[in-house]
Amino acid sequence: MRIIRFLDKQQKRLAAVTDDERAYRLPQPDFMTLIHQARERGISPVQLVESAVTPANELAGDWTSLHLITPVEAPEVWAAGVTYQRSREARNYEATDGKLDALTFYDKVYDAKRPEIFFKSTAARTVGPNGTVTLRSDSTWQIPEPELGLVLDADGSITGYIVGNDMSCRDIEGENPLYLPQAKIWRKSCSIGPAIRLAETVQNPYAFSIVCEIYRKGRMVVKSEGSTNELNRKLDELVSFLAKDNDLFAGTVLLTGTSIVPPNDFTLEPGDRIEITIGGIGTLVNPVISN
């Protein structure tokens, strides 16, 4: 069971999408209200959603043609870095100017007890399905980072899974690790969507397939695949470090790192289209524009 949010006559609406791709209007105003109402009633979110899956609430047509917006208005988006071997290799390439002739701090953090967790975005900087992501004006080497996202409640519990795109400037991060915030945070540098898979409907979160396709002038120029079974960290471990001595806000999203990195000679250009698919959740599509 997945949850989506869409605009209907400029009103934000919530809906459920079943595994047979049918969508049903929900009465709750937002995702976290749904989660909290289920908790107050002593039932699971799926049970609460199923009570609204009736013919009277069914939405006509293909749900992906709705005016989809971010499924959750995440007050904060955080991200974890160097959680996959492929990410470790890419960060080392950047830090050594492609020489790969020395151990770096990325090797250390990959094996360390403490993971790398950094602030990524706010609701105002985050776009949803079909929203435009922007290129930073002072970078010449920019890529998407396809990631599984965790939708968290204030107590740190994982309420759902979402597709995320952690846009990144490889040249800025590679120049100096202290430039990480500038390599990661600018307007419309993060996207999430198109749906939230309710956590209780996921048997094994380490079995998600992830595919990234990038199109330029109608032609696919990049296609890469990965899986969360390559994660070097446990999801609960990442959440525990984010929550430690920290205030979590209901609806916070934690992106869990990427195993997909385009070729080293590739950079995004205005007019490109990014499509990130996680099996069982959906495809997040974002056009690219200049900032």
Image: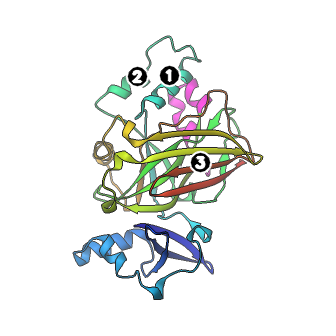
**Span highlighted in magenta in the image:** 170-189
In the image, what residue type sits under mark 2?
Answer: Asp
Which residue is label 1 attached to? 92
Of labels 2 and 3, earlier in sequence is: 2
Which residue is label 3 attached to? 189
Q: Which mark's residue is nearer the viewer, 2 or 3?
A: 2
What secondary structure is the magenta-colored segment mainly? helix
Query: Residue extending furthest bottom?
Result: 56
Which residue is label 2 attached to? 107
Q: Hey, which quadrant is residue 221 in on the image?
A: top right
- Mark 3 is surrounded, within 10 Å at the Cα level, by few (under 14), some (14 to 19) or many (20 or more) other residues, namely many
- Kind of element beneath mark 1: helix
Q: Is residue 176 magenta?
A: yes
| Location of residue 88 in the rendering, given as x and y in whole percent from the top left corner | 45, 27
Residue at 54 percent across and 41 percent down: it is: 145
Q: CA distance from mark 1 to mark 2?
A: 8 Å
In the image, what residue type sits under mark 3?
Answer: Ser
Query: Residue extending furthest left?
Result: 42
- Kind of element beneath mark 2: helix
Q: Is residue 54 magenta?
A: no
